[in-house]
Amino acid sequence: MSKLGVFDIAVRYGKVPAVNDLTLHVDEGERVFVSGPNGAGKSSLLKAISGAAATSHGRIELDGDLLTGRPPEAIARLGISMVPEGRDIFGSLTVEENLRVGTGLRRDAEAVEEDIAEIYANFPILGERRAAAAGALSGGQQQMLAIGRALMTNPKLIMVDEPSLGLAPKIVDQVYDTLCTLQEDRGLTLLIVEQSSLRAARVGGRMVLMRGGRIVGEGNAADMVDRDALAAAYFGQSPEKTETAT
Amino acid sequence: MSNLAQLFFDAASLGGLYAMAALGIALIFGVMKLVNFAHGEYIAFCVFALIVPSTDAVAVMFLGKAPALILIPVILGLGAAIAVASEYVVFRHLRKADPVAMMIASFALGFVIRNALLATYGGRPKAVSLWPGLNTPVDIAGASVPLLQLIVILSTLLVVTGLALLLKKSRIGLEMRAAAENFTMARLLGVRANRVITGAFALSGALAAAVALIMVTQTGVADVRMGGQIMLVAFIATVLGGLGSLPGAVAAGFLVGIVSVVLQAWLPLEARPFRDAFLYTLVIVCLLVRPQGLFVPASAKPRV
């Protein structure tokens, strides 16, 4: 049985469909990239899984538990954590308070302290600025904080929406190094929205291509950088210009 | 000198009252983006809970007869209860609705509570003497200050510090602050929406009850309309302070209180009846200069 099962879901905003007939399975410990053009429904897919957006059809399961219809806080309790697009750091809270928001669902107070110490060990800058307002951190530091914060709920699956958005390439490298290390150390399952298929290919994993709310291609990220497959996703079936596809 | 001292105590106690009322509104706005116009009716409800329900002109004390040690927690609890109940009955069902729809619902709820009070207690203001001893003046720094003013100032400080500590140090406080900034993100991290919202309503209702106790002791009157008047001032203070900012609400509440006392004292005699016109002109000027409020919450700043 797969870790995460998405069965034939649809998400609509009013009458506008964002996701249609989408079925996706993610195995335990797997790293899956969701790629595709703007408006393909990638973020809506993550929102549907996390409970932030309602599905109008289909069902979503984690370890066989039905997620559909549950509020986000209940889904977080079942082991899904989210690093949203734009990071959504609580800017008026301190760095440490940001980390602690997600610990309300845990009963292992000692492990919480250990986790915070570990995050500070991995990201020394967060430790140095633990009492500072999180809004004052740089974009890269906020991304690290958002990842650390997602870890604090002790999740099995972390979903990351556009981690490279607005960050310098060097920082993006660091973000992915961090995500991959964490995944190995903790046996996490990762579902990452990444517009750059080149980046996905370099990091490695399975890639799912979305377009118009549906999955239009799937395979090993390294193989998927293939121009035709991408062009098909971005421009439909008749690839003419492929230069902009990365 | 004694005049100045008198002015100080007047300003501080009126400002404290406004600050508490403004805090009650800002708390709910922070977590729910709802301006709860029924807040004034929570205050009136708590005032009338002190007396025996009847439409007679003379008020007979009911809860008001209880000793302060019992009376205060009971009234605070009642205030919290009516606020939580209104969330449960009305606002919970409108959470996904437009903020304007919620605001209108709060008006409607206010009318319901007000008319229920009118029906049970009658429309005429009633004399209520709660703790009359508190109005005996005490001499401080040459000024003659009613004991109650001192108690109001002290209890405001106590309430504001207590609330600040609660928000800063407790789990529910952390969750409220996170939810006030980004509710969806807080929920994605496992923060329970119902717990946070119920907590905010309970605190807000208890603040309304505190305001009710102070007002009734100060004025000696139970009037269905008394909540509406202070609600207006408190709402102005929350806007002036920057909607959603708790420190802003407190500061602006004090500011409005201080300015109105100062205007009352220093305006020429002929102009005094129009004090509120001067006060609201100042409010308009403030908002023209700083439309985002005088004390803007960090969450309102754009972040990259």
Image (tube, helix red, strand yellow):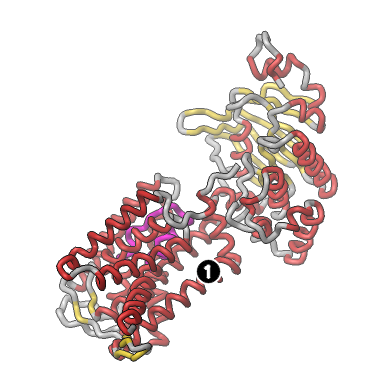
Total labels drawn: 1
Say which of B107 and B303 sits in front: B303
Residue A119 location, quadrant: bottom right
> What residue is drawn where x is 46% and y is 56%?
B244
Main secondary-structure element of the magenta-colored stretch: helix
Quadrant housing the C terminus of chain B: top right
State the image quarter where residue A200 is shown. Answer: top right
Tell me if residue B171 is in the magenta stretch: no
Mark 1 residue element: helix
Task: In this rendered view, identify the residue nearer to me: B266 or B67.
Answer: B266
Range shown magenta: B21-41
Amino acid type of disc 1?
A: Ala
- Position of B299 with respect to B132 (left or right) is right
Instruction: Where is residue B170? Give x, y as percent.
Output: 59, 68
The answer to whether any part of residue A1 appears in the image is no
A74 or B180: which is nearer to us? Answer: B180
Question: Vertical placement of B10 versus B103: above or below?
Answer: below
| Residue named by callout 1 | B164
